Amino acid sequence: MLKIQDVSKTFFPHTVNEVQALQNIDLTIDEGSFTCIIGTNGSGKSTLLNAVAGTFIPDSGTIHIDGLEISSWTEYQRARLIGRVFQNPFAGTAAEMTIAENIVLAMKRGKMHPLTIALNKKVKSEISDRIRMLKMGLEDRLDNPIGTLSGGQRQALTLLMATWLRPRLLLLDEHTAALDPKSAAKIAELTSEIIKEEKLTALMVTHSMQQAVDMPDRIVMMHRGKIVEDYQKEHKKRVRIADLLDTFDRVQKRELFDESVAKLLIREYI
Amino acid sequence: MNLIIGAFTIGLILSLLSLGMLISFRMIRFTDITVDGSITLGASLTAVLIMAGWSPWLATLAAFMAGMIAGSITGILYTRFKIQEILAGILMMTALYSINLRIMGKSNIPLLDTKTVSQIPEQLLLSASGGESKMLIAGWQVSLIDLSVLISSTFLCLVIGWLLYHFLLTHYGTALRATGNNVQMVRAQGINNNKMIIFGLALSNGLVALSGALLAQYQGFADVQMGIGMMVWGLASIIIGEALVGKTNIWTTITGAVLGTILFRLLIAIALRWGLNPNDLKLVTALFVFAALVAPQLFKSFHKKFTKSSNHA
C-alpha cells in the first residue's frame, strides 16, 4: 500500500549543523495495517512522516501509495490520498472559522471547491449527525469559532476531519503529545475506534510506549535516521513496554560503544 | 446637504476599495501595497477608454479586469518567485506608476461632459423633474447630477457587496478565507494555498481598480497621483467598520467595511470644512491608523497595570 524505498534526507548539508535525518529508509506498509513509529528525540520519526506527507522532498529515494509514485507531488496534491493529524492541536483547524466551516473544507479534501454555497441545512445536519459520535456536545455549537474550543476538542475534530472522506493513508504525528492526560487518552481511544471501524491504513508517531504497545499491530523503532527494530505480527503481540525500553538501551549503548571506540582510535592513531 | 451627499457618494465609491482590501488584508492576510497603484490603474484606464468612445460600463469592467491582472502579478511575485509580500506589492505599485502614465499619455486626463455609469438614473431623474437640473429634497436644493451619481454608486455597492457575500460563503470562498487563517490546515485539506493567494489578490485589486474607475467618473478626472495613500485610507475605513459593527461573521464584516468607509469620508469632510488643511489629510489618516493599531495594546497594558495596582490595595 505504502512503499518507502531508499529514502534519505539531510538537513543543512555541508554545514556544522548538518543532520542526516533519514538514511536510506526502506519501509512497506500493508493495506489495512496500523503501524506505530517510536524513537528518541531527533531519531527522524516525524521527518519520515513528513516525507510521506510531502512537507519536503527527500534528497533521494521514492515513495509509492497504491502503486502511484507520489515523491514529486506537492503537499496539497498528496492530501487527496492522505489524512493528517498534527502534534499541535491548533494546527489542524482554522481557529477563526466555525466548526461547520472547518468540516465543510474536510468534506472536499483533495477535491474541487465549486462556486456553490458551502453550508446549508442539509449539510449542517449531516455534520451534526457525525460529530455527535464524539460525545462532546459539539453538535450544538456548529456556528461557534473553532478557536473557542479546548485543545482536546480541536484534536478530536481534526481527527474526524482527516477521516471524513476515507483517506487511503492516515498520518498521526504524536497527535496526543500536547494534550492533558485525560484528553490524550480519549483521543487515543477515538483514534483506535475510527481506524478499526473504517479499516484504515494508518501510520502513527508516538512518544508514549503505552500507546505503542496497546494501539497498533506493528512497531517500528527508529534511531538516528535509521530503522533499528521492526516488531510485526506475533512478535509484536508478545512485546511489552519493558522490551521496548531494553531495545532502546541496547541501541544507545551500542552507539556509545561505537563513539568511545572511535575516540580511542583517534587518540591512538592520529 | 451637498456636502453630505458628496461625502456619501465618495464613501460608497471608496467602499469598493475597502471591500477589496478586506479580501487581501483580512481574508488571506496579505499586506498588499499594490492597492495604491491599482486604484490609479482603474481610473486611468477608464478615463482613456471613455474618452476613446467606449461605453462607460464596458470601460469600468475593463478597469476591473486590469486590476485583477495587476493583483495576480503581485501574487505570482510572492508565490512563484518567493518575494516578500510587502516588496512584491511595492514592485507592482512602482511598475504601475509608469504603466498608468503610459496608458494616459500624460499625468492627468479630464473627463468633462462625458458619459458615465450614472447616465441612466440621471436621465430618469431629469425626465421626472421635467428638465430642471435641481430638485428640492426636504427643503434642500440638490443637484440632480449629484443625486444620480449617489444612486448609481449605491446600486453598484449593493450588487457587489451581495456578490462578495455569497462568494465568501461558497466552497471556494471558504477555502480562500481558511488560507489566511491556517495555511498548514489548508494544505492538509488538499487546497493549493498559492492559487488561493493569487486569486484573492486578483479579486482584491479588481475591486480596488473598480473603485478607481468610479472615482474618476465622479471626480471628472484621472490623475497619476490619485492612488497615493489609498491603502492607508482603506485600512482606516476597515478599522472603523470593525469598531462600528464588529467582525463576528461575513455579513457584519462586509457591512462594517462599507459603513466604515462612509463614516470616515464624512468625518474627513467635516474636518475639512472646519478648516483642516487638505495637505495634512494623509498625515492625519496615517496618525489615525497608527492610533487604531496601537490603542488595543496600550489599553491592554493599562488594564493590566490597573488591575495589578488594585490588587495591591
Image: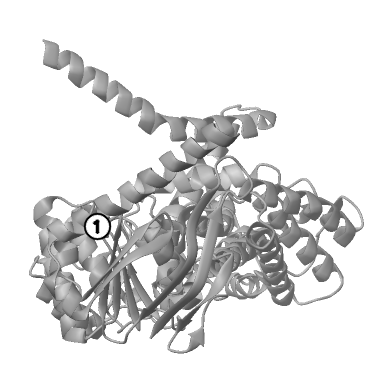
Which quadrant of the figure has residue B225? top right
Q: Amino acid at mark 1?
A: Thr
Horizontally, residue A77 falls left or right of residue A97, namely: right
Horizontally, residue A169 falls left or right of residue A268, namely: left
Kindly identify the residue that appears in the image at 45 percent across and 80 percent down: A113
Q: Position of residue A102 (x, y in %)?
A: 31, 68
Q: How many marks?
A: 1
Is residue A114 visible in this depiction of the protein? no
Instruction: Specify few, some or many for label 1: CA neighbours under 10 Å numbering under 14, 14-19, or 20 or more.
Output: some
Q: Position of residue B210 (x, y in %)?
A: 65, 64
Q: Position of residue B141 (x, y in %)?
A: 57, 52
Which quadrant of the figure has residue A34? bottom left
Given residues A115 and B150, the one toward you in this image is A115
Horizontally, residue B119 falls left or right of residue A218, namely: right
Kindly identify the residue that appears in the image at 42 percent across and 39 percent down: A260
- The colouring scheme, among rainbow, by chain, secondary structure or one colour, is one colour
Given residues B40 and A242, the one toward you in this image is A242
Kindly identify the residue that appears in the image at 33 percent across and 27 percent down: B299
Q: Position of residue B288 (x, y in %)?
A: 51, 32
Given residues A52 and A142, the one toward you in this image is A52
**Residue at numbered disc 1:** A247
Dot 1 lies on which element? helix
Q: Residue furthest front?
A: A268
- The correct choice, above or below, for B247 with respect to A35 in the image is above
Horizontally, residue A241 falls left or right of residue A42, namely: left
Q: Residue furthest right?
A: B105
Is residue A183 visible in this depiction of the protein? yes
